[in-house]
Every structure is written in structure tokens, then in C-alpha cells.
Image (cartoon, grey):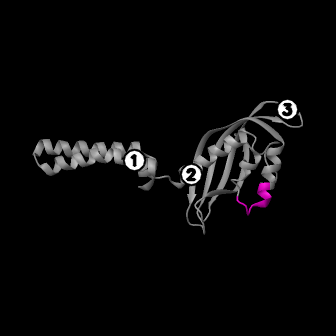
């Protein structure tokens, strides 16, 4: 219910509109003021649902925003900011990401689609598994290739920190179809 209220205000508005129409129809047929009053309350709740959805930022929305923000940092070739989304405790992962990003010059980093954000609330600290597809336009800093467009499938594991921030504790990227290739990180 919280996902419906916080992340899908259009569906909630549609449900409230159906309830309002049913209550108003009941009032018109029976003449009972309570039904008419209920219909007005349901109509008033429609903008309230949109307000709640705009004010209530869910963990899924925070993770999604962080993904788009990180894509912008990668596109700007800001390696320091791009790796700051990785947990400080994941030193090898930070070093791997920093080393990988340092090999390339990005001219575009676009999130095509976030396929899923699966919350794992039963862990000691909440985690989320994210599957998404991205496209980058990249050049090798060694001059091996220039401005090639590379579509990728990313798998990310996020963990919620005590300060409510989400950080990456694991990642892997592969071609959209198939298994590892020359761009895939080693050892993941």
C-alpha cells in the first residue's frame, strides 16, 4: 500500500475517483447525504494523494535518483564523485571502479531503463538489488578506440547506511545479451 501511495499517485487517484463516482452515484440514487459527503471526501483526497506522493521519497526513489546522478558524474568524467557512491568499507571495489573508469573518456552515459529494484529488508541493514541497462559513448585513453557506443547491463547491490544514505556494495556489468566481454570487470 505504501508503494501505491508514495510511488504511483495516478493509480491511487484513479481508485479514489472510482470510489468518489460510486459514492456520488449512490447519493444521487438514494438521496442520503452521507454518500454524497463520502464522494466529496474521496474527490478531495485525489490532490492529497499527489501531494503525499511528491513529499514522500521512498528508498526506491532515492536509489533511482542516485543512479541517474552517478550516470551524470560518469558522463562528466568525474571519477571521484562517481566512486563516492561505493561504500567506504568496499576498498577493493572502489579501487576496481576507479581503475576501470580511469581507462576511458566518456562523452555520454545514459540510463536506458531501470528494469528492477528489489528490496531485501530482511538483512541486518536493508539492501536492494538493482538491474538496469545503460549506454555509454566511450573512448580509450590509450587511443585503442574512439567514440564507440557500448550498451551494458548493470547489476548493482545497494545497502542502506545508518544515516539513511544508500551506497553500492557490489556491482557487475556485462553486455546486454550474453556473458562477459572485454569491458566486463574481472573477478566479479
Judging depth in this view, the residue of 22 and 180 nearest the camera is: 22
| Residue 90 lies within the magenta run | yes
x and y, in percent, of residue 120 in the image? 57, 61
Mark 1 sits on what residue? 51
Residue depicted at 62% across the width and 57% down the height: 166
* Range covered by the magenta-colored residues: 87-94
Relative to 149, 56 lies left or right: left
Specify the quadrant that holds the C terminus: bottom right
Relative to 72, 115 lies left or right: left
Do tag 1 and tag 3 residues touch (Cβ < 8 Å)?
Answer: no
| Residue 47 lies within the magenta run | no
Q: Secondary structure at mark 1?
A: helix
Looking at marks 1 and 3 on the same chain, the residue that comes earlier in the sequence is marked by 1
Give above or below for 108 relative to 101.
above
Measured in 3D between alpha carbons, the distance from the residue under mark 1 to the one under mark 2, in whole angstroms, is: 18 Å
Mark 3 sits on what residue? 145
x and y, in percent, of residue 130 in the image? 62, 51
Amino acid at each position: 500500500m505504501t508503494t501505491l501511495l508514495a510511488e504511483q499517485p495516478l493509480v491511487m487517484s484513479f481508485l479514489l475517483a472510482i470510489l468518489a463516482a460510486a459514492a456520488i452515484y449512490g447519493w444521487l440514487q438514494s438521496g442520503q447525504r452521507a454518500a454524497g459527503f463520502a464522494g466529496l471526501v474521496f474527490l478531495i483526497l485525489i490532490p492529497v494523494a499527489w501531494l503525499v506522493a511528491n513529499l514522500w521519497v521512498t528508498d526506491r526513489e532515492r536509489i533511482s535518483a542516485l543512479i541517474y546522478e552517478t550516470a551524470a558524474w560518469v558522463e562528466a568524467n568525474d571519477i571521484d564523485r562517481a566512486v563516492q557512491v561505493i561504500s567506504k568499507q568496499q576498498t577493493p571495489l572502489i579501487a576496481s571502479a576507479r581503475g576501470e573508469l580511469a581507462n576511458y573518456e566518456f562523452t555520454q552515459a545514459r540510463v536506458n531503463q531501470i528494469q528492477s529494484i528489489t528490496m531485501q529488508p530482511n538483512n541486518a541493514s536493508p539492501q536492494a538489488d538493482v538491474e538496469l541497462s545503460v549506454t555509454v559513448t566511450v573512448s580509450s585513453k590509450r587511443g585503442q578506440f574512439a567514440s564507440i557506443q557500448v550498451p551494458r547491463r548493470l547489476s548493482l547491490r545497494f545497502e542502506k547506511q545508518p544515516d539513511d544514505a544508500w551506497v553500492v556494495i557490489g556491482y557487475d556489468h556485462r553486455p546486454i545479451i550474453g556473458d562477459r566481454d572485454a569491458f566486463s570487470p574481472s573477478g566479479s
